[in-house]
Amino acid sequence: MKEKLQAAWKYLTSKEMILYIVFGIITTLLNLVVYFLLTDAVKMNKPLAYFIAWAVGVTIAFITNKKYVFESKVKKKKGILFELGTFIGGRLLTFGIGEVLITAFVVMLHQSNLWWKLITNVIEIVGNWLVSKYITFKKKTDQEPAMEEEVK
């Protein structure tokens, strides 16, 4: 048990996790600023504002996750498309969950916009990390086809 706790602590304090958290905080803050500017200042409907804030966040997150967090070396067109597709696919899944929660609890049940936005962000962060770590930017083994050659 002690070894598992030490391994978990080692990963939680690793460069990868620290960068994921730092860029996640930046992306989350940007997402929140865009969302609340659109809902409060512009008076945009909440589901549309949620989508726009999400799209801004996904764009920033893909760039920072690929380059700095997971340090992807993938350069083949097929590999880049795989990364982009699975990254966006994972984000769409967590976006859908968030959209349903915002619509149900904020729009229909008139609960706290702030609290439900924060709750959906936590759900998204955990889900997005799982997809990025274990699917999108998973380190390739020697048995898997290399996707690291230059795009032509």
Image (cartoon, rainbow, N blue to C red):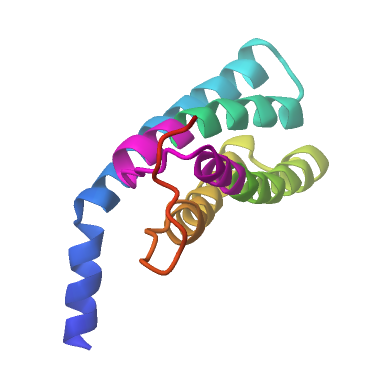
Q: Position of residue 85 (x, y in %)?
A: 61, 43
Residue 82 magenta: yes
Q: Position of residue 135 (x, y in %)?
A: 50, 58
Work out which residue is located at the far bottom of the displayed protein and give it.
1
86 versus 141 height, above or below:
above
Q: Position of residue 150 (x, y in %)?
A: 41, 35
* Residue numbers of the magenta segment: 62-87
Residue 111 magenta: no
Residue at the (60%, 45%) spot, across then down: 91
Work out which residue is located at the far front of the displayed protein and give it.
152
Q: Of residues 133 and 23, which is closer to you in this image?
A: 133
- Total marks placed: 0
Left or right: where does residue 103 sit relative to residue 22?
right
Residue at the (58%, 16%) spot, across then down: 37
109 versus 4 height, above or below:
above
Residue at the (41%, 43%) spot, across then down: 74
Q: Position of residue 54 (x, y in %)?
A: 60, 32
Work out which residue is located at the far right of the displayed protein and give it.
108
Residue at the (64%, 17%) spot, across then down: 38
Q: Of residues 130 and 118, which is closer to you in this image?
A: 130
Q: Of residues 54 and 65, which is closer to you in this image?
A: 65
